[in-house]
């Protein structure tokens, strides 16, 4: 995918939609590159300094940098081979193709992990407000002080624990939660 | 009928046209690619018994067998094999640990390996790949696909076929389904393996995701999540509900994702 995009940009500046359409025509078959796969690749190439962007009339145009052009020249043979032949045997090519597919697989794994994580982050419950957090902290340290093993006999500790459980039960009731914890 | 015994690097160009290919190897690496050129076999290094090759009628066999005997655990059996066959050749590949690369095939492909890594590129025909611990990675697969592993990962990049079934115990499933807006069907079953499914375009699927304890994450507000003791589900209909997406796990987390708009 990287090589195709690089080689397309070698023909000149393009904007995103043009790239996607041309890729589909070039690769053909049932492979339909989508915005979701092409734009991250473009961003990656930009991060690597191989591609530069420019904005005009609300559209982003992509072009190769000097480094991008060198990379393209270096990989020109690789691109030709990928484009024309799916049936060449040479072991070197097979290893290259295998690692290319494996790299694509890894990239897809990372992309989907990240997408999933982004959704989960949005679903995460909001943290406590500052004041409530402070009250909890004060409560916890006071409690810990009162229930310290060396100053409190076992019977008193049992009474304190029972009081704590009663407080939690009351809180559950106020919040309309079921009686027992999951 | 033609037969060969290969012990050293050699390339054979076949006179006949194979319509069926059977390869059985132990260790090393195997590449099978589709080509309209005359079929060839290229054998690199051979360690252990010779690789036996036989072409009879349209059936081509390439076999390096592990001899049984008291030295089985000591002697290495390995070879580096690359084959090119016609795109419509039916292919059956079986290895113990040799990695397998299959490219461009258009008829049935059956691939089995115990621990080898299986890589498929632009395979158009119906394909089935099974491993125990080897990972399976398929890119641009456009035929029906069935993948099974015990612990190997299953990754489908740009899957354009209309039916896929993936089963694993603990492997991670990652699949990008490109034909989600048609009648594509996907069925995924894992025990503890996590599942990441991206439905491209405007998906049109009846969805049913079930897990005992796995966390369910969805990018689709149309799907309803329900959670109870011992069962979590995510169900609903996307688009016109023409295809079917069914995911079942015991503890594996499931994420149903959509394509990110740039």
Image: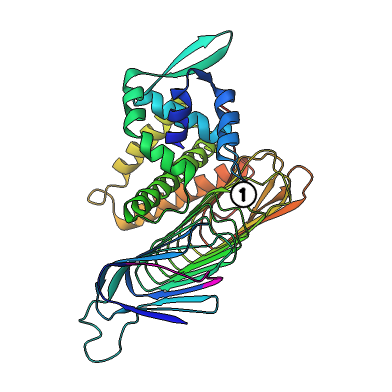
B198 on left or right of B75 = right
Q: Is residue B250 above or below residue A131?
A: below
| Residue identifier under label 1 | B160
Q: Residue at x 55, y 39 (%)?
A: A27
Residue B200 rendering spot, x and y as whole percentages: 63, 41
Circle 1 sits in a helix, a strand or a loop, which is it?
loop
Q: Which residues are magenta?
A: B11-20
Q: Is residue B96 above or below residue A93?
A: below
Q: Residue at x 34, y 53 (%)?
A: A95
Q: Is residue B19 above or below residue B34?
A: below
Q: Is residue A73 above or below residue B169?
A: above
Q: Residue at x 73, y 47 (%)?
A: B182
Q: Nearer the viewer, residue A25 or A104?
A: A25
Residue A62 rendering spot, x and y as whole percentages: 47, 19
Q: Nearer the viewer, residue A58 or B110?
A: B110
**Residue B19 in magenta stretch:** yes
Residue B38 rendering spot, x and y as whole percentages: 48, 62
Residue B260 visible in the shown view: no
- Dividing the picture into quadrants, the one containing residue B261 is top right
Residue B234 rendering spot, x and y as whole percentages: 66, 51
């Amino acid at each position: 995918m990287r090589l195709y995009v690089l080689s397309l940009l070698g023909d000149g500046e393009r904007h995103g939609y043009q790239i996607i359409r041309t890729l589909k025509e070039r690769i053909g078959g049932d492979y339909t590159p989508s915005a979701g796969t092409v734009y991250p690749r473009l961003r990656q190439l930009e991060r690597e300094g191989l591609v530069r962007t420019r904005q005009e009339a609300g559209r982003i145009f992509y072009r190769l940098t000097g480094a991008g052009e060198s990379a393209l020249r270096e990989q020109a043979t690789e691109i030709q081979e990928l484009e024309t032949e799916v049936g060449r045997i040479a072991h070197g090519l097979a290893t290259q193709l295998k690692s290319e597919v494996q790299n694509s697989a890894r990239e897809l794994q990372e992309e989907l992990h990240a997408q999933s994580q982004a959704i989960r982050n949005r679903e995460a419950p909001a943290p406590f407000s500052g004041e409530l957090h402070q009250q909890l902290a004060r409560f916890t340290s006071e409690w810990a002080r009162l229930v310290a093993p060396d100053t409190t006999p076992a019977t008193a500790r049992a009474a304190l624990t029972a009081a704590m459980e009663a407080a939690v039960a009351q809180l559950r009731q106020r919040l309309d939660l079921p009686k027992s914890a999951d | 009928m033609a037969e060969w015994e290969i012990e050293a690097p050699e390339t054979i160009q076949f006179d006949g046209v194979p319509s069926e290919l059977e390869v059985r190897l132990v260790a090393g690496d195997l590449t099978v690619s589709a080509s309209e050129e005359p079929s060839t076999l290229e054998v690199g290094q051979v360690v252990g018994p010779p690789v036996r090759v036989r072409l009879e009628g349209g059936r081509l066999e390439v076999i390096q067998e592990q001899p049984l005997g008291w030295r089985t655990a000591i002697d290495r059996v390995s070879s580096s094999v690359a084959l090119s066959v016609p795109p419509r050749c039916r292919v059956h590949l079986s290895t113990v640990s040799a990695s397998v690369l299959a490219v461009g095939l258009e008829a049935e492909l059956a691939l089995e390996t115990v621990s080898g890594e299986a890589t498929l590129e632009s395979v158009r025909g119906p394909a089935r790949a099974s491993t125990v611990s080897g990972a399976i990675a398929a890119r641009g697969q456009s035929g029906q696909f069935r993948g099974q592993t015990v612990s190997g990962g299953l990754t489908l990049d740009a899957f354009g076929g209309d039916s896929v079934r993936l089963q694993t115990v603990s492997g991670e499933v990652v699949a990008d389904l490109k034909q989600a807006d048609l009648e594509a069907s996907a069925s995924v079953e894992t025990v503890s393996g996590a599942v990441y499914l991206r439905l491209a375009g405007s998906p049109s699927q009846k969805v049913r995701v079930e897990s005992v304890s796995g966390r369910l994450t969805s990018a689709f507000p149309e799907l309803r999540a329900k959670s109870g003791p011992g069962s979590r589900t995510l169900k609903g209909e996307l688009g016109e509900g023409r295809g079917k997406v069914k995911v079942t796990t015991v503890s594996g987390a499931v994420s149903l994702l959509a394509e990110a708009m740039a």
